[in-house]
Amino acid sequence: MAKVFIYPVNSLILADLVERFGHKPLAVMNQVREKVTNISLDSPPVNITPEDPKVGLRYAAVEVPPGVRGRMALIGPLIEDAEAAIIVSDPPTDFGCVGCNRSNELMKYLVRSKDIPILELRYPETEESAQEFVYKIAAFLDALSGEVEK
């Protein structure tokens, strides 16, 4: 079972596909769940722990907008844990959207700079391309299963 970073990081469709093929999706939903169920936060999800800004600074400088650092405090550790990645370009907002292009570009840069298998796809626009989209993801995840077993 490989840990697969998905982009967009909150895509339920990608997370479900990765999980169905026996891998662990690294998605922001799991990170947020940990934050809002953590007893160290008084009124989740508004509050943060004193460690969160420090984590964000590992990925983005202090001059970067705080929203980018906040997002990277959640997403950066996922990228570090990734053993593979699926990146979907030009997705519509309802497929999964972080809402900040600077965060998006930084995430993709960090993923691409790792030495891991990466599948990059364009969001499908037709039913035919959607079938090909799922087929390519399935083939990529099956190949990962073979690599993990070795």
Image (cartoon, rainbow, N blue to C red):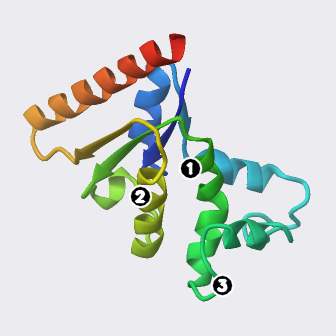
Q: Residue at x 88, y 66 (%)?
A: 42
Label 3 vs label 2: CA separation? 20 Å
Q: Which residue was labeled with disc 1?
A: 79
Marks 1 and 2, the one that precedes in the sequence: 1
Residue 25, horizontal then vertical, whole percent = 53, 35
Q: Secondary structure at mark 3?
A: loop
Image check: 134 left or right of 66?
Answer: left
Residue 56, horizontal then vertical, whole percent = 68, 69
Tag of residue 118: none
Q: Secondary structure at mark 2?
A: helix
Image check: 25 left or right of 131?
Answer: right
Q: Residue at x 91, y 59 (%)?
A: 40
Question: Which residue type does callout 2 highlight?
Answer: Lys
In this view of the protein, which residue sits in the foreground, 59 or 130?
Answer: 59
Tag of residue 108: 2
For residue 150, above or below residue 118? above
For residue 92, above or below residue 80? below
Image quadrant assignment for residue 58: bottom right
In this view of the protein, which residue sits in the foreground, 46 or 145?
Answer: 145
Is the N terminus in the top left, top right, bottom left or bottom right quadrant?
top right
Residue 97, horizontal then vertical, whole percent = 41, 60
Mark 2 is surrounded, within 10 Å at the Cα level, by few (under 14), some (14 to 19) or many (20 or more) other residues, namely some
Question: Which residue type does callout 1 highlight?
Answer: Ile
Label 3 vs label 1: CA separation? 20 Å
Q: Which residue was labeled with disc 3?
A: 62
Question: Which residue type does callout 3 highlight?
Answer: Val
Residue 11, horizontal then vertical, whole percent = 43, 47
Q: Residue at x 27, y 58 (%)?
A: 92
Tag 1 near tag 2, CB within 8 Å: no
Label 1 vs label 2: CA separation? 9 Å
For residue 8, above or below residue 116? below
Image check: 107 left or right of 101?
Answer: right
